[in-house]
Each structure stands twice: as structure tokens, then as C-alpha cells.
């Protein structure tokens, strides 16, 4: 049956596979390699672009690739992607501000006010982190082969 075959390596899926949002299945290592080499980051079967590539790439890998690409862009004076780097830096500054606000809130003693504000801050904090991660993933997809 076709559903049990990884279309990247054409071998049986077995138990070690990843199901994408579009419903197609691949070996975890195969689809990771596909997304790393693919400039578009699309499904090999239907060319669907997963909304959240972050579930395939860990935070450590994303940050490592981002930092390498940032060095590459700065070294080669790539003006086009410099704007994207600056945008990510601005988003990180917003995140730092939210972290400071959360730290100040933790010192507050009024319980109800603290819980309400904490919930609001946590929501903003994780939205901001997700926004930064998506921007880094977009940048990473433009430079599949840059390694420092």
C-alpha cells in the first residue's frame, strides 16, 4: 500500500515516521532532510507549506542556524536579508521587555491582580516567542546550505 511507503527514500515507513499537517507520512529523518534542503519547505507530495515547521526543528537547532545565517549575512553585507535580521532583533527586544515585566510581576503581592496580569503576560510572551520562531524559520529556509 502506498500509505506505508516514505516517498523520499521509497522504503517502508515502519514505526518511525512523522505525519505532516497535510496528512502525508514520511520517515522523521527523511522529512527533516527534505525541509533542510528544500528552499520552499513544502510537502514533497502535495507542495503544502506546513504552518508550523517548528515542530520538526528544535529550538536549539533554529537558534544555531539563525546565528550562523546572521553571521553570514553580516559578513557578506547582504542588505536584502539584513532587514529580516533587524526585524527579528526588534522582536527579541520586545520579548526581553516582557521578561522584565514578568519578573516585576513576580515581586507583586496582590494575588488576584498578579494572576490576571500573569496570564496576560504569559499569553503575550508565548505569542512573541512563536512570532520570533516563525521569522527565524522563514530566514533559515532562504539559506539551506549556510553552515559556520
Image (spheres, grey):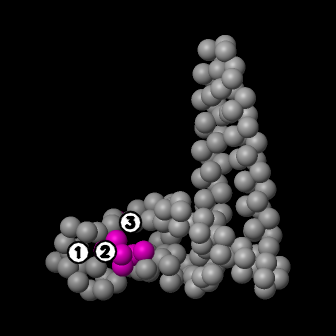
Circle 1/circle 2 CB separation < 8 Å = yes
Residue 29 in the magenta stretch? The answer is yes
The secondary structure type at the circle numbered 2 is: strand
Where is residue 109 drawn, in percent x and y?
67, 15
> 95 above or below 5?
above
Sequence-wise, the earlier of marks 2 and 3 is: 3
Residue at horizontal 53%, vertical 62%? 60
Question: Around disc 2, counting alpha carbons within 10 Å, would you say few (fewer than 14), some (14 to 19), or many (20 or more)?
Answer: many
Residue linked to disc 1: 13
Residue 133 location, quadrant: bottom right
Which residue is denoted by mark 2 in the rendering?
27
Question: From the viewer's perspective, is the residue at label 1 or at label 3 nearer?
Answer: 1
User: From mark 1 to mark 3, how far is it between C-alphas?
Assistant: 14 Å
Circles 1 and 3: CB distance less than 8 Å? Answer: no
In magenta, the rendered stretch is 23-32
Q: Element type at marker 3?
A: loop
Amino acid at each position: 500500500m502506498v500509505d506505508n511507503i516514505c516517498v523520499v527514500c521509497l522504503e517502508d515507513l515502519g514505526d518511525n515516521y512523522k505525519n505532516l499537517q497535510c496528512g502525508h507520512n514520511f520517515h522523521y529523518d527523511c522529512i527533516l532532510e527534505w525541509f533542510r534542503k528544500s528552499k520552499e519547505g513544502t510537502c514533497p507530495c502535495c507542495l503544502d507549506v506546513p504552518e508550523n515547521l517548528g515542530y520538526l526543528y528544535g529550538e536549539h537547532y533554529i537558534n544555531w542556524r539563525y546565528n550562523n545565517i546572521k553571521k553570514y549575512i553580516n559578513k557578506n553585507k547582504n542588505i536584502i536579508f539584513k532587514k529580516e535580521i533587524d526585524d527579528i532583533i526588534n522582536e527579541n527586544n520586545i520579548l526581553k521587555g516582557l521578561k522584565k515585566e514578568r519578573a516585576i510581576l513576580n515581586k507583586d503581592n496582590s494575588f488576584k491582580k498578579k494572576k490576571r496580569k500573569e496570564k496576560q503576560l504569559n499569553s503575550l510572551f508565548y505569542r512573541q516567542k512563536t512570532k520570533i520562531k516563525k521569522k527565524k524559520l522563514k530566514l533559515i529556509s532562504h539559506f539551506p546550505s549556510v553552515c559556520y
